[in-house]
Image (cartoon, rainbow, N blue to C red):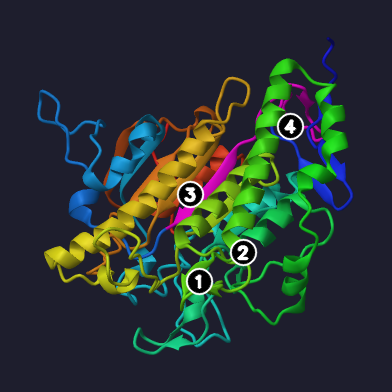
Amino acid sequence: MNQRPLSRRTMLRGLGAALAVPWLEALVPSARADERLSAPPLRSVFLFMPNGVNPNNFTPKKILDASGKATENFELSPMLQPLAKVKDDILLLENLFHAKTAGRNGHWPKVPAFLHGGFVVRTSGRDLDVGGTSLDQVMAQHHGDRTPLPSLELGVDPARSGIDNVGGGFTRIYGSHIAWRDPHTPVPKEIIPQLAFDRLFRSASAAPVVSGFNPNQPAVIQSLQRDDTSVLDLVLDDAKSLKRKVSANDSVKLDEYLESVRSVERRIENTLKPQKRWINAGRFDLPRPGPGIPQTHEEHLRTMLDILVLALWTDSTRIATFMLGEAQSGRGFNFLDGVTGSWHGLSHHREEPKTLAQFEKISTWHISQYAYFLERLKSLDEGGTSLLDNSQVLFGATIRNSNAHDNKDLPLILAGKAQGKIRPGRRLTSAKETPLNNLYVTLLKNVGIDVPKFGDSTGALQGLA
């Protein structure tokens, strides 16, 4: 069979639906001169975790060579154990920090500075100023026109309003966003799985991205009540036609992709169905959380990660952020054995062993979610390389020791090979108090944006490759 070339922007279309296809052997570049023939794109993803870590169990012990010099080798520390399957795909980054967050409030001005390191102005909300445009949005401004979505912002907590007077008079809006279109404008994140899914696969105009969830917002209500026909049923004829045009390998990949889409659909459906339980001698109680939010946090976060995988796999976007929590998340994690307090409350553990152990379980659980995401990317083949090989995925926080609000030597993990521009499977120890923005200069260069300076950077971060 002679395989017919397909446009990189091939879509599976049906009434009310449009699915971008994943990378296939049959794809040829679009008319853009900078799209190389049959080359998978490079993706950039940034996952943020608030509240920091337990440094003693996060940073691996140094491994010395025969002369007593520290090497790049490392053994997984207790908190990094969930990353065992992708150990060779991660790079531990040490001694990076944002100087302009030093001496500030413990949480609020640190969160929005995560991806640019600017000085965040104290305000009640009218005159927001975070001191910079976030790294993801710089990338989107340069390359966002290459994909249906210039960037994708996801999270699990609604945006907060009001002023934290106890924390120094900062607006809580600061703690709800890491993506900033400019120093004054946060980019709203989507926290509702169905709406995030529809942005990828529904061709009709979906409800706008909302920061949090307003049950009285008509557009959201309309979106949640729309026809729940599977998008796969809507594009079935187009999918069958495409399979007749591609190779056997591409046909297998297409089947895998369509099943992944359906799997996410099923998870969204299942997590939104009220679960029946017996009370009062036979009466049914039908508990349900706020419209559109899965019943359990585990299912909520995992479903959003799966949607993010689909977004990257289909080249719906190449730039994404994911907030695993907002600045002072009070979420409970009692589904973890032995954990009884709130995330932020436990982060102020005062080095009390029992409290610290609970806090560490929460942080480690979030690292396990990062590991799950990386494993999914690694499992997806793109012509002899994996989606993870074709990505640069940063996971980190703007606090190291949560109890002390320490902003130095931030807990940061960079995964993926960025198509050979990053050499993972080791630790990279920079000089103490190296600007985190040095890393960002290099990540920008990796995607073809060559800037001499980003924020307070002093140059590119040495040693990534």
Provide residue 274's location: percent of width, then percent of height. 58, 66
> Amino acid type of disc 3?
Tyr
Label 2: element kind: loop
Tags 2 and 4 in contact by the CB under 8 Å rule?
no
Mark identifier at residue 176: 1
Which of disc 4 and disc 2 is earlier in sequence?
4
**204 within the magenta span:** no
Q: Which mark is residue 192?
A: 2
Circle 4 — which element?
Answer: loop
**Alpha carbons under labels 2 and 1: distance apart:** 15 Å
**Mark 2 or mark 1, earlier in chain:** 1
Residue 378, image x, y percentages = 50, 32
Exactly how many numbered labels are in the figure? Answer: 4
Residue lying at 51% horizontally and 40% vertically, measured from the top left: 392
Q: Is residue 42 magenta?
A: yes
Q: Nearer the viewer, residue 409 or 100?
A: 409
Marks 4 and 1 sit apart, C-alpha to C-alpha, by: 35 Å
Considering depth in this image, is 402 or 124 the residue closer to the camera?
402
The dot on residue 426 is none
* First reached walking from the N terminus: tag 3 or tag 1: 1
Give the mark toward the camera: 4 or 1. 1
> Any mark on residue 35, and which?
4
Residue 209 position (above or below residue 388): below
Q: Residues within 10 Å of mark 2 (few under 14, many from 20)?
A: many
Name the residue type under label 1. Ser
Q: In percent of the image, x 65 and y 46: which residue is there? A: 311
Q: Which residue, given by chain and number where applicable, does mark 3 sit on? A: 440
Q: Is residue 299 above or below residue 170?
A: above
**Percent coordinates x, y for residue 87 in the rendering:** 35, 33
Mark 4 or 3, which is nearer the eye? 4
Q: What distance separates the C-alpha of mark 3 from that of mark 1?
A: 21 Å
Say few, some or many: other residues with alpha carbon within 10 Å of mark 4 (under 14 / 14 to 19 / 20 or more): some
